Amino acid sequence: SDLAAYFAEVVDADQKIEPRDWMPEAYRRTLIRQIAQHAHSEIIGMQPEGNWISRAPSLKRKAILLAKVQDEAGHGLYLYAAAETLGVSRDELVDLLLDGRQKYSSIFNYPTLSWADVGAIGWLVDGAAIVNQVPLCRCSYGPYARAMIRVCKEESFHQRQGYEILHTLAHGTAAQKAMAQDSVDRWWYPSLAMFGPPDGDSTHSAQSMAWKIKRFSNDELRQRFVDMCVGQAEALGLRLPDPELRWNDERQAYDFTQPDYDELMRVIKGNGPCNRQRMEHRRRAHSEGAWVREAAAAYAAKRAVKEKEKVAA
Amino acid sequence: SDLAAYFAEVVDADQKIEPRDWMPEAYRRTLIRQIAQHAHSEIIGMQPEGNWISRAPSLKRKAILLAKVQDEAGHGLYLYAAAETLGVSRDELVDLLLDGRQKYSSIFNYPTLSWADVGAIGWLVDGAAIVNQVPLCRCSYGPYARAMIRVCKEESFHQRQGYEILHTLAHGTAAQKAMAQDSVDRWWYPSLAMFGPPDGDSTHSAQSMAWKIKRFSNDELRQRFVDMCVGQAEALGLRLPDPELRWNDERQAYDFTQPDYDELMRVIKGNGPCNRQRMEHRRRAHSEGAWVREAAAAYAAKRAVKEKEKVAA
Amino acid sequence: MSELFPFTLALGDDALIAAQRLAEWSTRAPEMEEDIALSNIALDQLGAARLLLSYAGELEGAGRDEDALAYLRDDREFRNCLLVELPNGDFAVTMAKLLVLSAYQVPLYTALAGCPDERLAAIGGKARKESAYHLDHAALWVRRLGDGTEESHRRMQAGIDQVWAYADELFAARPDAPVDPATLRSEFDDTVTAVLAEATLTLPEVGWTPAGGRDGVHTEHLSYLLAEMQVVHRAHPGARW
Amino acid sequence: MSELFPFTLALGDDALIAAQRLAEWSTRAPEMEEDIALSNIALDQLGAARLLLSYAGELEGAGRDEDALAYLRDDREFRNCLLVELPNGDFAVTMAKLLVLSAYQVPLYTALAGCPDERLAAIGGKARKESAYHLDHAALWVRRLGDGTEESHRRMQAGIDQVWAYADELFAARPDAPVDPATLRSEFDDTVTAVLAEATLTLPEVGWTPAGGRDGVHTEHLSYLLAEMQVVHRAHPGARW
């Protein structure tokens, strides 16, 4: 059809598909799923870091952390708005999350056990997210690409803050340095797993590549992330917990140990250390807030009636 | 009447009135009110000390405190049982407490602000309670008198523990000693107020004296308490916060500053620092436990039916 | 030690403890936009707290910075009003607390902006704009909840009933301070009365006036809040963060 | 350091953290008799914790007594199972936790009572009687709630569903220990299965096995519990109490 041809042409030419444009139903569905999952990840991802706001060890760090968690809520909102341009409502998507029918990034199912984890999440988890997301700024769907540009800008700010936290700890007291190393030890492999299963096992990839939703394979991005981290870890004075990590001159890249993909699958299936806790937290906030949302709606309805009466009078 | 004469004779002879005996309705009502108030005080009185169980600074102190708060629950139960011998049920009395129609000792409407308060409550509050209660061991109503004997034994044990806590603090670091002094400063006058308004303003006293429910006036007991505390404070190395406190050779007793009876009246009327908090805590525990009590009753009823069926079969 | 120290410390402690409580809503608010709004308000309070505590440390002249004051004092040394340390309760209680706090902070910071002490005047000038937003936000929710559903009306009235008595402490006379809070009461009363009327809510008669925060005699809640807030900082004496 | 140290420490930490959680019910239980009963059980656990931690300190040989071990370690150094650190939840969750814990501690302490180490044997001999009472108490309530009202059945089943997965960690093999917990699993399963059947409850299928407590990788709950438990002790370094 003409529409399909026009769609293919726009994608091929690296132009943007916009909400008003025709698009294949599978493209729409893929994007909704991916953007929603991304939005859910921002919202659920507030919890592990939010866990340390009340205990942040200086007022400055408390302010930075609070602002960061707030930014994540903001990212969630942009992304839900981007998904809404595809003809689905935020409420529907939130219900899909709360019912467990849509996922969020598995990384947020690990617990934050120390203040240093706030640093490690910033450095490694946000770092991995950026490597994943930078290519999405060129994604074929306009609203998603534009949301990602904004998100990535803020994420790289967050990543720098995380790096700074770890840097301060790694150059602080012996206990602080040990805390930092312990965090890196716990977060390294889960961060590597954020790029998804190895390319051989990845399902949706080929079609997403063709549609220019995805631009690099899981393994390419993972390698890029490892190569980026090695030098930063050295600068931090922290050790990446991989005895096999070494420069491969032939590949011009670092060799490294793959994360435990069985563990990744367990966590994706809902059986990570914190899946139940994260979902219960979100469900509780949602259900405990129901009376407030209802009140706001009732108030707005009353006001609308009053406005009408005023106009009529 | 013969019954009234017999009642008067028993009381005059310092014998005990027992549940099966005839007694004037006003005597019964006075006793119910007093015993219930006493029971309520034990139950509400668990809260200020219970506030420090989770934070007790050594495991030994934690065990002692937990056992003490548990003892208070036990005292509450004896006393409700003593009141029940007068033809009222514990559930009725608990409802009277929760509705605010019966009182508890005003002392428990002050907050516990430090670990030392656990010591000060033991030493001063339990000390004042003992001075109040020892004469009640000879009260004319048998079940109350016997409950008080048991309660007083445990209370003096608690008082010694409180004294010990303060002694350790007063002989510890400068910060510990300051903490102990601060507690005594805050608890001294409220403890004096535990004996009630001055004799001139006390309403029920004369009749209670005649019935041998009460044996000494408020002011007599208060004086006895002050005289007891002065030496103990010296031994502790802590200062009682009363510049007027001095030995009166003529009276063979200590002169002292009276507590603020206006404050006492405010607290009795429900306007102390913690009245609302204490009542809300109790009401919440009661209402949150309702489904458990209902389940226990339903289970017992089912079992009773099954037992009957077994017998019938 | 400057005579401005106790006043500045009290204001800083109000803001700090308010920030700590408001931040507890992060990830728990009734809707996502409100999560962001409450974090914003918490950030404003925290920002004011940092300016005030830093300045308090200078006024004291004993070498304590904002973190020393925030993390290394016990509850008996805190000078915040009781209102801000009360537990959050439900969203209605939180909005009742925020209404009272911001209806007090708006005239307070406005007056402070005109006081002779330049540092305090600068802090007041910055903070009054933020407080005006907090007040708008709280007032909007109090109206929505008060005039929303039957349940929200009941909860909002209960929230007001619960916190109203704690307002008195805010306006205790302090004649020597750069701004005597007693002079702010009538503006406060006008603000709150108007909001409650629009919200179809009633001003409760209370008959008790809890106080003590300004003298370091707090509720039983504050020491728990501080135990959590200070735990990491205190576990690493002398460390930098 | 004796090879018995890690095992003894883990048992002591289980008992200590269980005591801390159970004691949170003090003044909050559904009925007064139950307030007393839960305090009793908390006191038993605390008593066992003190014996075990004191002995652990001796086995370690580094001069740490029960209080040094209880108050001066961070969560990463605690070796308790995750089960005991989970929040209390409602009364049904607490009874589910207590059922699992005591159905594990009864055979554990019984076996310990016969182990070659005299001190551990003595502790086991004392604690097994207490644990038998805890088990009876938990089983009674699980039956009452499971076979009580519709609401209590729902809550009790939810309680079991919530904690059941945490049982696995208790029985992780420890072949070098005086008692290998793996050998206790079948007795545990028999006990719990019988109680749940009588209570008209179903054993959930879980499919996940949370663990990490024995290696010091806990849930996010433990550090909050410790912050509160340790706050006074840590605020006064070196003080006696």
Image: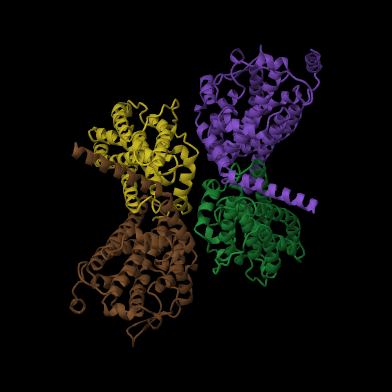
Chain colours: A purple, B brown, C green, D yellow
Judge whether residue B248 can be spotted in this image. yes
> In this rendering, does residue B56 appear at all?
no
Q: Quadrant of residue D204?
A: top left
Q: Nearer the viewer, residue D62 or C27?
A: C27
Image height of C214 relative to A282, above or below: below
B29 or C67, which lies in front? Answer: B29
Seen as rendered, the residue at the extreme bottom is: B250
Pick whichever, A180 or B22, lies toward us. B22
Q: Residue furthest front?
A: A313
Q: Position of residue A112 (x, y in %)?
A: 54, 36
Position of residue B197 measured from the top left corner of the image (x, y, whole percent): 41, 77
Give left or right: position of B205 versus A216: left
Exactly how many numbered labels are in the figure? Answer: 0
Q: Estimate the x, y position of residue D221 in percent, counting from the top left.
A: 48, 41
**Rendered location of residue C114, percent (x, y):** 77, 64
Pick the front one: A191 or B8: B8
Give left or right: position of C231 versus D26: right
* Image point (46%, 45%), residue name: D226
Q: Quadrant of residue C65?
A: bottom right
If the image is split into quadrants, where does the C terminus of chain A sit? bottom right
Q: Is residue B151 left or right of residue A34?
A: left
Quarter of the N terminus of chain A within the rendering? top right
